[in-house]
Image: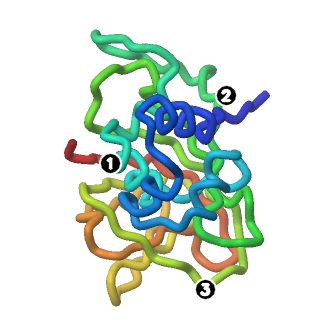
């Protein structure tokens, strides 16, 4: 049984606790007021890029939105615990559940890396909106076939392939045309 972590509610709570208006938040993050309202109402979770911008605008780590509790020591995530997912629409207006993110480190406090298992559903969508943010990403394909647009290049990755790149270059991760994929993604965000 999967349940969605209500990331938007947490964002709204942080914003209000810091007395930041939606307009100020939009200015700080470079997102529109409508985008922020949509995120806070949990109508539309963006891909990681905008979420990182929101975290920076609030002066918190990305992980703060995903955390369940704070564990300073090591965190073990058992296979059977991959039941709590966060869905991102991945920049496509029609596909609300384009990707399902399973955070592997929600309990780890103060982390700088975000490890996820991501289920990417097959889609015929090819008109992707690329995003850029600070940090680095490492992706390992567990199954299926993946396509990554990175700057002006396109990379196709199959099971067992991996890629490591700087997130500051505009990029988009999606299934190869009409194909689904399951990946291990590690996102590093300097704070």
Between label 3 and label 2, give the one nearer the viewer: 3
Taking the image as shown, residue 112 lies to the left or right of residue 35, namely: left
In three-dimensional space, the C-alpha distance between marks 3 and 1, rounded to whole angstroms, equals 28 Å
Between label 3 and label 1, give the one nearer the viewer: 1
Q: Earlier in the sequence, mark 1 or mark 2?
A: 1
- Location of the N terminus by quadrant is top right
**Whether residue 67 is situated above or below residue 53 in the rendered picture:** above
Q: Quadrant of residue 126?
A: bottom right
Which of the two residues, 18 or 149, is positioned nearer the viewer here? 18
In the picture, the disc for residue 83 is: 2
Taking the image as shown, residue 86 lies to the left or right of residue 146, namely: right
In the picture, the disc for residue 127 is: 3
- Per the image, label 2 sits on a secondary structure element best described as loop
- Per the image, label 1 sits on a secondary structure element best described as helix
Which of the two residues, 111 or 21, is positioned nearer the viewer here? 21
Residue depicted at 44% across the width and 53% down the height:
25
In the picture, the disc for residue 56 is: 1
In three-dimensional space, the C-alpha distance between marks 3 and 2, rounded to whole angstroms, equals 30 Å
């Amino acid at each position: 049984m999967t349940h969605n972590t209500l990331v938007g509610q947490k964002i709204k709570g942080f914003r209000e606790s810091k007395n930041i208006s939606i307009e100020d938040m939009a200015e700080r993050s470079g997102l529109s007021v409508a985008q922020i309202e949509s995120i806070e109402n949990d109508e539309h979770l963006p891909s990681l890029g905008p979420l990182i911008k929101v975290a920076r605008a609030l002066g918190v780590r990305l992980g703060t939105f995903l955390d369940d509790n704070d564990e300073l020591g090591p965190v073990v995530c058992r296979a059977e615990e991959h039941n709590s997912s966060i869905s991102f629409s991945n920049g496509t207006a029609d596909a609300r559940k384009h990707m399902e993110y399973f955070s592997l480190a929600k309990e780890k406090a103060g982390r700088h890396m975000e490890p996820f298992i991501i289920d990417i559903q097959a889609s015929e969508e090819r008109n992707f909106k690329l995003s850029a943010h600070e940090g680095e990403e490492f992706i390992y394909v567990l199954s299926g076939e993946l396509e990554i647009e990175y700057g002006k290049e396109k990379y196709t990755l199959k099971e067992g392939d991996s890629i490591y790149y700087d997130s500051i270059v505009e990029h988009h991760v999606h299934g190869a045309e009409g194909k689904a994929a399951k990946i291990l993604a590690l996102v590093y965000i300097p704070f």
